[in-house]
């Protein structure tokens, strides 16, 4: 099943976790520590009661400390801008009608970020084809991100609370990969 189909079939909790997982993997671009989104994950395990409060705290930690983004000057700036938008546009409640659109936008943004940062990519990665199941010619970093997104949505569709824990593990692994890519790019510039 394609990523687009999985998003279309996901319930609210699956959509919230899918969008959150995309955002979580991109936290290295926002300068946040690995635990900054943990309260959002926790809110999904208890029915989302604290989602709005946890979201505001994450925004305060990750967005308020950064300067407003103007025109991106580098690939890293563009990638960080996309990550900030993911966080900035998250709905106040994961049961809001806009959760599907947010999860879909996070999916696109995260794939785009991975395409921008992949040294094997030309910086102009198209994400529509891979999201619809056409994966030929994808760069390694984008292919891995696509697999993670599909895995997260499949886990949540099949395993409920256990799936949420496993989805977080998949996200943590992806965050480590992206952190390594960002670090390697920074060393290459120095």
Image: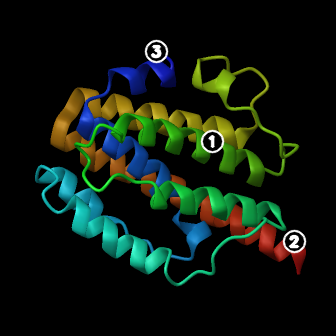
Secondary structure of the residue carrying tag 2 is: helix
Q: Label 2: which residue?
A: 188
| Front label number (2 vs 3) | 3
Q: Is residue 36 visible?
A: no
Of all residues shown, which one is farthest toward the bottom? 65
Residue 177 placement (x, y as % from top left) = 60, 57
Whether pointer 3 and pointer 1 mark residues with C-beta atoms closer than 8 Å, the reply is: no
Q: Residue at x 84, y 68 (%)?
A: 73
Label 2 vs label 1: CA separation? 22 Å
Q: Is residue 164 visible?
A: yes
Screen quadrant of the C terminus: bottom right
Q: Residue at x 69, y 58 (%)?
A: 79
Q: Label 1: which residue?
A: 111
Image-quadrant location for residue 167: top left
Would residue 178 appear left or right of 169 to someone viewing this image?
right
Q: Residue 160: give its label.
A: none
Q: Label 3: which residue?
A: 1
Secondary structure of the residue carrying tag 3 is: loop
Label 2 vs label 3: CA separation? 38 Å
Label 3 vs label 1: CA separation? 18 Å
Residue 8 placement (x, y as % from top left) = 39, 22
Residue 124 placement (x, y as % from top left) = 83, 40
Give the mark nearest the N terminus, 2 or 3. 3
């Amino acid at each position: 099943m394609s990523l687009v189909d999985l998003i279309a079939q996901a319930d609210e909790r699956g959509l919230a976790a899918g969008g959150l997982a995309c955002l979580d993997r991109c936290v290295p671009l926002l300068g946040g520590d690995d635990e900054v989104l943990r309260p959002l994950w926790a809110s999904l395990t208890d029915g989302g009661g604290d989602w709005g409060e946890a979201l505001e705290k994450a925004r305060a930690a990750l967005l308020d400390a950064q300067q407003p983004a103007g025109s991106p000057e580098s690939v890293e700036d563009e990638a960080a801008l996309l990550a900030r938008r993911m966080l900035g546009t998250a709905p106040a409640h994961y049961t809001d009608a806009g959760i599907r659109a947010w999860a879909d936008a996070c999916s696109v943004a995260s794939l785009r970020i991975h395409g921008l940062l992949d040294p094997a990519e030309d910086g102009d990665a198209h994400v529509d084809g891979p999201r619809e199941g056409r994966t030929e010619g994808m760069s390694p970093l984008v292919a891995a991100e696509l697999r993670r997104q599909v895995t997260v949505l499949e886990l949540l569709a099949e395993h409920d609370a256990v799936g949420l824990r496993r989805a977080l593990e998949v996200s943590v692994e992806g965050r480590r990969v992206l952190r390594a890519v960002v670090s390697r790019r920074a060393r290459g510039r120095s």
